[in-house]
Image (tube, helix red, strand yellow):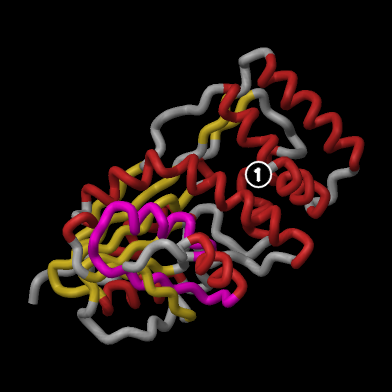
């Protein structure tokens, strides 16, 4: 799924649960993009930053082509091996997105999902994707958020800044990567299309279900940001009350980029 910051051992299971829910909830955004770029008819596909393999599983459902899924974490690849054990068209490899262990002009399609936000050098990653894609081939970067465009109401002065980018920065990510996708792809020499994948705003019932599934992850993030238990309890009470009243609204844009490598 993504190149992710190092996750403490005691939080790894929570992180995997969050990735599972994230893959389920974002399928409606990603799958139309996979179909748009011709994934179904591709012969050789590279999925970079496959992580737990839950997004790679969606790709495997949609194509008869061969998929090479690569990630820099041996621990995540162990999870992916279990998730993808039924798929004969998927090969897992250990490798770094900024230095792909593949020849030039090799793949028909290269995909990544929520990868560039965590990359130390996102331009180098995109340059590498452009190197290994065949002339005329297509690169898709999906689900790259921009927390600068996050909308939330009712507001909370202590919690909102944390979930609007501060927590991402603290973990080494770029909360504003979405707005940079065009620059990254154009500088890699790609014919580039940018769009926003998510246009539907969740209902309060959907927000509630997501929150309780990932509650431990969010509470720990607030503690790490320095909030007291009393602050967290008060925020949670107000947040759940606003969901019960049906007035809570959450939205932040998730961008995608499609790049085509020019023919020689």
Name the residue: 69% across, 16% down. Answer: 244
Q: Examine the rendered structure and indicate whether residue 237 appears above or below residue 82.
A: above
Residue located 33% across and 46% down the image:
31
Q: Is residue 25 left or right of residue 14?
A: left
Q: Which residue is mark 1?
A: 163
Q: Is residue 56 magenta?
A: yes
> Picture coordinates of residue 255 (x, y %)?
39, 48
Q: Which quadrant: the C terminus?
A: bottom left
Residue 85 highlighted magenta (yes or no): no
Horizontal and vertical percent position of residue 207: 60, 30
Count of numbered marks: 1
Nearer to me, 170 or 38? 38
Where 166 falls versus 159 (above or below)?
Answer: below
> Taking the image as drawn, is residue 187 in sight?
no
- Which residue is farthest top? 245
Nearer to me, 159 or 45: 45
Q: How far across and down, in percent of the image, does residue 153 sit?
A: 62, 25
Q: Position of residue 149 (x, y in %)?
A: 50, 40
Segment tinted magenta in the rendering? 51-74
Seen at 86% across and 36% down, the residue is 231
Tell me which corner region of the image, top left, top right, bottom left or bottom right, holds residue 92. bottom left
Give the residue furthest to the left: 264
Residue at disc 1, secondary structure: helix
Q: Is residue 201 above or below residue 169?
A: above
In the displayed structure image, the side of residue 230 where residue 87 appears, left or right:
left
Residue 129 in sight: yes
Q: Is residue 75 left or right of residue 143?
A: right
């Amino acid at each position: 799924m993504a190149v992710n910051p190092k996750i403490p051992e005691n939080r790894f299971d929570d992180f995997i649960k969050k990735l599972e829910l994230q893959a389920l909830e974002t399928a409606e955004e990603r799958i139309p993009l996979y179909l748009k770029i011709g994934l179904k008819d591709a012969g050789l596909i590279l999925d970079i930053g496959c992580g737990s393999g839950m997004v790679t599983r969606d790709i495997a459902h949609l194509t008869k082509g061969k998929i090479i899924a690569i990630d820099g974490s041996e621990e995540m690849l162990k999870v992916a091996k279990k998730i993808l054990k039924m798929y004969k068209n998927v090969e897992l490899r250990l490798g770094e997105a900024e230095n792909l262990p593949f020849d030039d002009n090799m793949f028909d399609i290269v995909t990544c999902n929520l990868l560039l936000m965590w990359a130390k050098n996102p331009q180098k990653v995109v340059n590498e994707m452009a190197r290994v894609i065949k002339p005329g081939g297509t690169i898709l970067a999906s689900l790259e958020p921009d927390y600068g465009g996050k909308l939330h109401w009712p507001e909370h002065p202590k919690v909102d800044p944390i979930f609007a980018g501060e927590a991402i920065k603290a973990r080494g990510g770029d909360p504003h990567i979405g707005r940079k996708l065009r620059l990254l792809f154009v500088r890699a020499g790609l014919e580039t299309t940018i769009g926003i994948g998510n246009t539907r705003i969740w209902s309060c019932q959907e927000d509630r279900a997501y929150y309780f599934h990932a509650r431990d992850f969010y509470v720990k993030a607030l503690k790490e940001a320095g909030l007291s238990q009393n602050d967290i309890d008060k925020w949670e009470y107000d947040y759940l009350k606003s969901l019960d009243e049906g007035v809570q609204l959450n939205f932040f844009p998730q961008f995608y980029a499609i790049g085509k490598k020019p023919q020689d």
